Amino acid sequence: MINSKEVKPLFIGHVEAVKMHQLGFNRPCVAWYVDSKTIRVGIAKASDPVKRIVEAPTWDQAFEWLQTKYKLHGYFRKNFQDELSLSEQIWEYIIPYTSIKLSKEDSLINRDAPFRNVARQHLLQELISKAEKS
């Protein structure tokens, strides 16, 4: 049996999954959210008592779908431009204005993320927000 707590970091959060569902995401996923805190992993059968509420895409599925459907993309990386010690390095995420539907003013660089996972989540949230406005 798969422990859902161990695999939960492989999937986007519940709030983002709901928003992507509202934007039209309907690709097959190996996990789904039963509620805001509970994720189920596996293949559901028609006879299963638990209904799939919201599909839980992997991070790769989410970014790929936003790029394919909305032509939105971005990336995150360790910020090496500042002269900080290695222990003080921070992560940044970037949404280039070359991403279709964005003007040069909408280009976004955020250098607030102390951890990779935070930068990844913030990037996804920004891309979803831009898709909602398109």
Image (cartoon, rainbow, N blue to C red):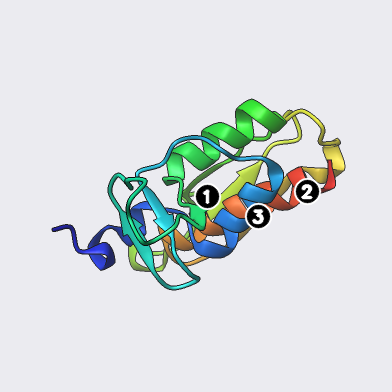
Side of 102 where 111 appears, left or right:
left
Inter-mark Cα distance, 3 to 2:
9 Å
Residue placed most toward the observer, 49 or 131: 49
Residue where numbered disc 1 is placed: 81
The disc at residue 100 is none
How many neighbours does mark 2 have within 10 angstroms: few (below 14), some (14-19), or many (20 or more)?
few
Q: Which residue is at 60% across, 57% downward?
A: 18
Q: Give whichever of discs 1 and 3 has the lower sequence position.
A: 3
Q: Would residue 109 be seen by someone viewing this image from the given angle? A: no
Q: Quadrant of the C terminus?
A: top right
Hey, what amino acid is under mark 3?
Lys
Q: Would residue 37 be seen by someone viewing this image from the given angle? A: yes
Inter-mark Cα distance, 1 to 3:
34 Å
Residue 84, how many percent across, how many down? 45, 63
Residue where numbered disc 2 is placed: 132
Residue where numbered disc 3 is placed: 19
Hey, what amino acid is under mark 1?
Gln
Q: Secondary structure at mark 3?
A: helix
Which dot, 2 or 1, sits closer to the camera?
Answer: 2
Hey, what amino acid is under mark 2?
Glu
- The quadrant holding residue 131 is top right
Q: Secondary structure at mark 1?
A: loop
Inter-mark Cα distance, 2 to 1:
32 Å
Q: Are marks 3 and 2 in contact (CB under 8 Å)?
A: yes
